[in-house]
Image (spheres, grey):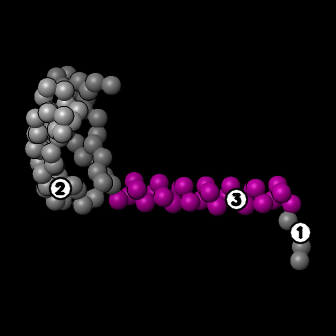
Amino acid sequence: MKKISIAKKISIALFILIFACIFNYSKVTANSKCLAYEPEIISVTGIIQPETFAGPPNYSSIKKGDEALKYWIIHLDNEICINKNTDEINIPEY
């Protein structure tokens, strides 16, 4: 059996890694068109479930006396991305 040099092994490994990254990136970008802010109307699908979080006064522990606050959270069927809002009124904070 022919020996393969370390440089050749590294080259092959890098080729495979780059191919995998490009394949995964193209799959993500092809399947996920980013959504826009208003005035566009969009549809998403998922399951809405209640989740309880700690509220006032400390927002840390219901067991230690904080108020229990129930929020309805949508767990989407698919990941989404949102385009950055660029209007003059709703400036995003970073």
On the image, which quarter does residue 53 sit in? Answer: top left
Q: Nearer the viewer, residue 2 or 58?
A: 58
Residue occupying image coordinates x 12% and y 44%: 71
Q: Is residue 5 above or below residue 40?
A: below
Badge 3 amino acid: Ala
Q: Residues within 10 Å of mark 3 (few under 14, many from 20)?
A: few
Give the mark nearest the N terminus, 3 or 1: 1
Gap between marks 2 and 3 measured at Cα: 39 Å
Magenta highlight range:
5-31
Query: Where is the N terminus found, in terms of image quarters?
Result: bottom right
* Residue holding disc 1: 3
Residue assigned mark 2: 44
Within 10 Å of disc 1 (Cα), the crowding (few <14, some 14-19, many 20+) is few
From the top left corner, tell me how far across and down residue 43 is, in percent. Answer: 15, 54
* Magenta region includes residue 22: yes
Question: Disc 3 marks which residue?
Answer: 13
- Number of residues whose C-alpha sits closer than 10 Å to that of mark 2, classed few (under 14), some (14–19) or many (20 or more): few
Residue 56: percent from left, percent from top = 12, 28
Q: Residue at x 28, y 24 (%)?
A: 93
